[in-house]
Image (tube, rainbow, N blue to C red):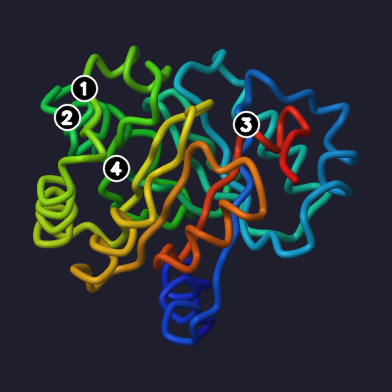
Amino acid sequence: MIEVQSYLREIREAVLENRKLLAILIDPDKFKETEAADFINNLPAETTHILVGGSTVEPGQTCNVVKAIKNLCGLPVILFPGDHSQISAYADALLFLSLISGRNPEFLIEQQVRSVEKIKNTDLEIIPTGYILIDGGNETSVQKVSNTVPLAQTEIQQIVNTALAGQYSGKKLIYLEAGSGAKFPVSPEIIKTVKSSLKIPLIVGGGIRSKRLLQKAYNAGADLVVIGTAFEDGTFD
């Protein structure tokens, strides 16, 4: 029997081996397929995953981007969809997101239900993920689209309880997100406290614009860090 590759298992193994992971996030609406080769050539050497998704994306654009990247790169391409329309069978896996920091049923379960017809006959690895929006100092596109309020960085116990509720309800990953273009990232104190409470891998993204901030997130306990805006606009240093 041929063993099916599991990207979740690989993340878990990296956590056990204390290997830190780095994902570069592509917003399909800001990506030109004609520049895919340059994008791949400019990836940081330590990149382990590519995420594809945005709060709002033109129909069909996600598929175009995924195919362009897959044709040039052997890294896992994982969907990070803003809604059910951003699902592409050409990707390797799907973060099956529930916005558990908010109380809008549209992003807790409705988008997930609407996505089933698209994913049930694909080979995508489906990874249930608890998505927690943390205040990053400005109103992000996620906040606007989802019509939810991010958790304040001072509400550490509430953030921990939300993460644990995700774990207890069967999520396989927890994603702490300060949002695209955040003025400041999720604090090391939050990352450390959440990580020490969880038994599942922790993803952290939003507002990480330098190697110094990347290392601070790793040191605090992030297993996989996501960089998007800073890589897009060339300001990551």
Give the Cα distance between marks 2 and 4. 9 Å
Where disc 1 sits, the SS reads loop
What is the quadrant of residue 45 in the picture? bottom right
> Which is more foreground, mark 1 or mark 4?
1
- Say which mark, if any, is on residue 229: 3
Where disc 2 sits, the SS reads loop
In the drawing, does residue 52 fall left or right of residue 155?
right
Residue 115: x %, y % from top left: 32, 32
Front residue (pair 86, 22): 22
Does 3 sit above or below residue 235? below
Residue 4: x %, y % from top left: 50, 73
Residue holding disc 4: 131
- Say which mark, if any, is on residue 149: 1
Mark nearer the N terminus (1 vs 3): 1
Q: Residues within 10 Å of mark 2 (few under 14, many from 20)?
A: many
| Residue that appears at 13% across and 58% down | 164
Q: Are marks 2 and 3 in contact (CB under 8 Å)?
A: no
Mark nearer the N terminus (2 vs 3): 2
In the drawing, does residue 224 fall left or right of residue 166?
right
Where disc 4 sits, the SS reads strand
Mark nearer the N terminus (1 vs 2): 2
Q: Are marks 1 and 2 in contact (CB under 8 Å)?
A: yes
> Which is more foreground, mark 2 or mark 3?
3
Residue holding disc 2: 102
Amino acid found under the numbered disc labelled 1: Val
